[in-house]
Image: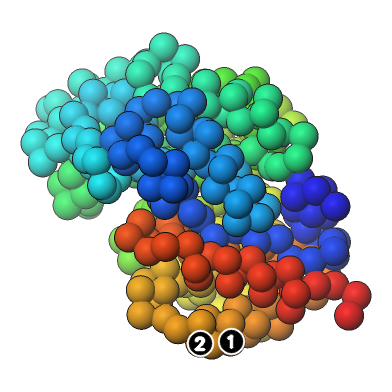
Amino acid sequence: MTPLERVTKTLHHEEADHVPAYPLCNSISWKNYGIGYDEWSTDYIKCAEAIIKETEDLQLDVICTLIDLSVEAADFGMKVNYFPDKAATPDTERFIKNIDEYDKIQCINPRETPRMSNMIKMTQYLAEKKGKEYPIIPFVFGPMGILSMLTGLEYLLVDCMKRKNRDTVKKAINLIGDVLIDYSDALIDAGAHTIMFDTLFSSKTIMRANMWDEFEGPSMQRIAEHVHARGCMVMIHNCGDGIYFKEQIDRMHPEAISMLYLPPDCSSMQELKETYGSVTTIIGHIDPGFLMVADEDHLRALCREQLDAYKKDGGFILATGCEYPANLDDTFARIMVEEAQTYGKYGI
């Protein structure tokens, strides 16, 4: 069974040969390919080849294009700093410094802007090289996350709470959402099997559920409906504490949700499986921070606990809840894959 066949069955809530494994190891692939993080982030062919090499070497079941969270914000005008040994980050000087500058956000063509066009090209490259064997999943930051990069998180939240600024914020989110619809079209045309949207704000870590639903919910609903209408699947990634499953499922009807922490309406993994396991596929949720202090036995036990809770009837991909630590070697990733292939095997 190929990884694409395995993941497809899993997303349809069917038991494959074993649970798919997806520790998100893009963050270490550049080292094993012998290039710097900055070169990996900006050369889409070298980036794609590094991800392919890592995927095949570790026997991963998913190819995702996550590089860093600055891709879309950079094309909207945010200055981004690149480093040889860590992910790119937005500059400390904010692109939007006050509410009067929100009109600096203009509609852009993602097929022509530097970073998003590179992601489109990389998706096509990966699809042509490996799309018949692996699910190709572009990673896209949600509109509110992009806006927070441009304004600064603290300032955006203040604007959301000021009644006189709320419509301005919503207008900007909707404009960014329009661009993401165009971006999604280009990624689908390039060969994406599904698109994973990072809805960072949809967790109690940042804001109340009804506030997320008011500000980003309508835009994400439009995007998800468009992607589904194109015959492409929708995934969500959110590594915030208390991720809002219910609200996002109501808005987006995602085929899968990648998460680090349990939603606030579930007190256990068993309750999560019972409540949402037939509605969406669960992706997760080994804590990357835990891997910094883990030992092999403890990690195996944690993998098996999650496999016991989630693997029945499919609908589960064993993964890290966020990026694999960039300063670790791949030992723990290999252990996760081994546990998925052995302890996560079906029919035993």
168 and 70: which one is in front? 70
Q: Residues within 10 Å of mark 1 (few under 14, many from 20)?
A: few
Is 112 displayed left or right of 313 in the figure? Answer: left
Dot 2 falls on a residue whose secondary structure is: helix
Question: Most extreme residue toward the front, as rendered?
Answer: 34
Is 311 displayed left or right of 159 in the figure? Answer: right
Quick check: marks 1 and 2 in contact, CB under 8 Å?
Answer: yes
The reply to whether residue 156 is visible in this rendering is: no
Amino acid under disc 2: His
Residue 219, image x, y percentages = 48, 37
Number of residue marks = 2
Is 266 displayed left or right of 46 in the figure? Answer: right
Q: Is residue 219 above or below residue 263?
A: above
45 and 175: which one is in front? 45
Which residue is denoted by mark 2 in the rendering?
298
Residue 139, image x, y percentages = 50, 40
Residue 84, image x, y percentages = 24, 41
299 and 176: which one is in front? 299
Which image quarter: residue 67? top left
The residue that appears at 51% across and 82% down in the rendered structure is: 296
Dot 1 falls on a residue whose secondary structure is: helix
The residue that appears at 30% across and 18% down in the rendered structure is: 106
Residue 22, image x, y percentages = 60, 58
Which residue is denoted by mark 1 in the rendering?
301
